[in-house]
């Protein structure tokens, strides 16, 4: 029987844009939504307004939403939309222990030291495109937003992904985020740090494919999406 395959919709992390997903999109078919502070230099509104802008671009659905870093907080806020069939959170933020600038800077530097250095120019170019003003505004807006509270209202499968060397998304924090969702689970990528979408696209693609398969429905069921042959 033909099945309805949800579309993948991706939301970048702070300061990043579609280039952060380019290696992944060679492996899976997906759309990228750019928002203020995440690929766009426009003024950054509240997380609720960012989520509304994301929902406005979803189309008819069904979709699986995937966010990276601070994009996870926007995805979590948008995931109550009935068109959302599943959620993947890659390195979700913001651990309350990292809201103090000195602590955040230390953990960011320790995580950056574990990243693959070939990606540095790619990241810097994206940050320049988005701009420091929009990035600061996104941080101020999203950092205090309680992602766990958002996820308690999300009743679709939620997969939280972290790299085992990611100090911005420590294991206990990632596990707590996964546990907040009624249907949450945690997946760890061995040897990865924070920017898993660029450095470990095969691992992330496997998680995304599994998330889509898990919520595919028989044709004629709820939602409308691409239909498998």
Image (spheres, helix red, strand yellow):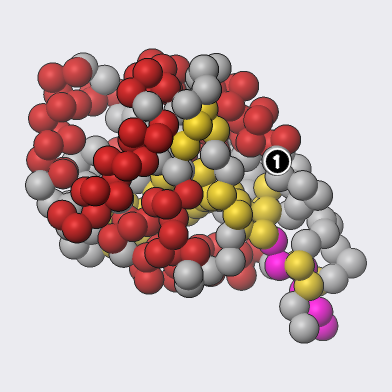
Where residue 157 sits in the image (x, y, percent)?
57, 53
Residue 5 belongs to magenta span: yes
Q: Which quarter of the image is occupied by the C terminus? A: bottom right
Q: Is residue 21 left or right of residue 193?
A: right
Q: Is residue 74 left or right of residue 122?
A: right
Q: Residue at x 85, y 63 (%)?
A: 221
Q: Which residue is identified by label 1?
A: 57
Q: Nearer the viewer, residue 67 or 183?
A: 67
Which region is colored magenta? 1-6
* Residue 156 visible (yes or no): yes
Which image quadrant for residue 55?
Answer: top right
Residue 131 belongs to magenta span: no
Q: Residue at x 19, y 58 (%)?
A: 118
Which image quadrant for residue 199?
Answer: bottom left
Q: Residue at x 81, y 49 (%)?
A: 60
Which image quadrant for residue 35?
Answer: top right
Q: Is residue 178 above or below residue 128?
A: below
Can you name the residue that lies furthest to the right here?
Answer: 220
């Amino acid at each position: 029987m033909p099945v309805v395959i949800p579309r993948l919709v991706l939301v970048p992390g702070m300061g990043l844009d579609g280039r952060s997903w380019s290696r992944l999109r060679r492996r899976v078919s997906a759309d990228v939504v750019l928002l203020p502070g995440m690929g766009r230099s426009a003024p950054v509104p509240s997380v609720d307004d960012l989520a509304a802008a994301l929902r406005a671009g979803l189309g008819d659905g069904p979709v699986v939403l995937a966010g990276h870093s601070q994009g996870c907080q926007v995805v979590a806020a948008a995931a109550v939309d009935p068109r959302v069939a599943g959620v993947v959170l890659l390195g979700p933020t913001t651990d309350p222990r990292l809201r103090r600038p000195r602590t955040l800077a230390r953990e960011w530097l320790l995580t950056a030291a574990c990243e693959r250095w070939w990606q540095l120019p790619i990241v810097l170019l994206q940050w320049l495109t988005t701009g420091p003003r929009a990035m600061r505004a996104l941080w101020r807006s999203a950092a205090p937003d309680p992602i766990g509270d958002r996820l308690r209202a999300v009743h679709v499968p939620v997969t939280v992904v972290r790299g085992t060397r990611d100090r911005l998304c420590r294991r206990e924090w990632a596990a707590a985020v996964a546990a907040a969702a009624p249907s949450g689970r945690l997946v760890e990528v061995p040897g990865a740090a924070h920017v898993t979408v660029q450095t470990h696209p095969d691992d992330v693609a496997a998680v995304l494919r599994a998330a889509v398969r898990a919520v595919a429905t028989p044709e004629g069921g709820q939602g409308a999406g691409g239909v498998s042959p």
